Image (cartoon, rainbow, N blue to C red):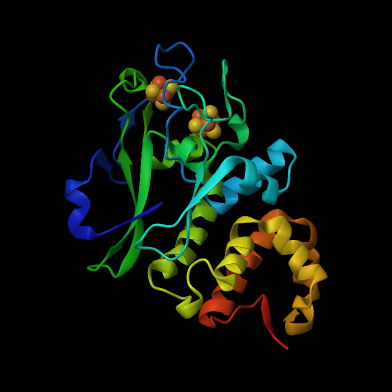
Amino acid sequence: MKYIEIENIACLPGRKLEEEDTFSFHCHPGLACFNRCCRNLNLFLYPYDVIRLKNRLGITSGQFIDRYSDAVLRPSNFFPEVLLHMAENEGQTCPFLSESGCSVYADRPDTCRLFPVEQGIFYDAQTMKTRMISFFKPPDFCLGLHEKTIWTPKTWIQGQDAEEYHKMTLQWADLKERFQSDPWGKSGAEGPGAKMAFMAIYNIDEFREFVFKSSFLKRYKVASETLKKIRHNDVEILKFGFEWVKFYLWGIKSGYLRLR
Ligand code: SF4
Ligand code: SF4
């Protein structure tokens, strides 16, 4: 998810798609380019992607982060980007790529679902609202764009079963935007506070342990209904983590928790 400056929209690569715009595309194993795009990628993983993938693989979020991701802190940001670690083979293929295609297809990341459509968020000063913008950006070698199936951005999201991803990515984008300014002060973007926030956002199994097994619940009052939900539900603990980070770093009040 990118944040786009409105004056830059016209010079961005790819074809901008308004709500009613259409594009034709179909990706299938019969194309000579099949699997060619699943390699040598900067594939961004969002927090909900990690939940889906770690559950698909039957491992914890901590194991997933260790085995499959790289965290990169850009100079202009104060929270790391999490990227899928490509296999260390000649083609630098995606670790989930198999002969027959994507081995985690039903749980593939948001970016893969939407590909070759990319989405960004921009603030429209005229309407004073934040809105999503889509670009159709197939790589040069993509043969799917010569196929006849017609989509709009909305039907593409529906067709890729990406609605839940979309919802969770927007919630993450809302929080992530706050990290464009420095919340860390002297402790820095790799200090203890930053590590806690990373845990709450990307390592939800460890965050759950932290909530239930440390002094967290002595310091924070959390409604019993919320506790029931977050104990076993990964999406609920992630949403709770987002709220806690906003409260912990910026003092933003939440219906989920308050200080005792
Ligand atoms: S997760 Fe699946 S769709 Fe995404 S790059 Fe890897 S193999 Fe391709
Ligand atoms: S290059 Fe295009 S058509 Fe070919 S596998 Fe990738 S997305 Fe599908």
In the image, what residue occupies the spot 41% across and 51% down? 1
* Residue 70 on image: x %, y %: 52, 46
* Residue 145 on image: x %, y %: 32, 23
> Which of these two is toward me, 62 or 168?
62
> Which of these two is toward me, 249 or 146?
249
Query: Compared with residue 176, is residue 138 higher up or lower down, i.e. above or below?
Result: above
User: Looking at the image, how many numbered discs can be counted on the residues?
Assistant: 0
Residue 146 in the figure: left or right of residue 104: left
Quadrant in the picture for residue 247: bottom right
Query: Compared with residue 135, is residue 175 higher up or lower down, i.e. above or below?
Result: below
- Report if residue 26 is visible in the image: no
Quadrant in the picture for residue 36: top left
Quadrant of the frame with the C terminus: bottom right
Query: Compared with residue 23, is residue 118 higher up or lower down, i.e. above or below?
Result: below
In the image, what residue occupies the spot 80% across and 69% down? 212
Residue 12 in the figure: left or right of residue 32: left
* Residue 86 on image: x %, y %: 51, 34
In the image, what residue occupies the spot 48% across and 72% down? 188
In the image, what residue occupies the spot 75% across and 39% down? 58
Residue 35 in the figure: left or right of residue 224: left
- Report if residue 248 is visible in the image: yes
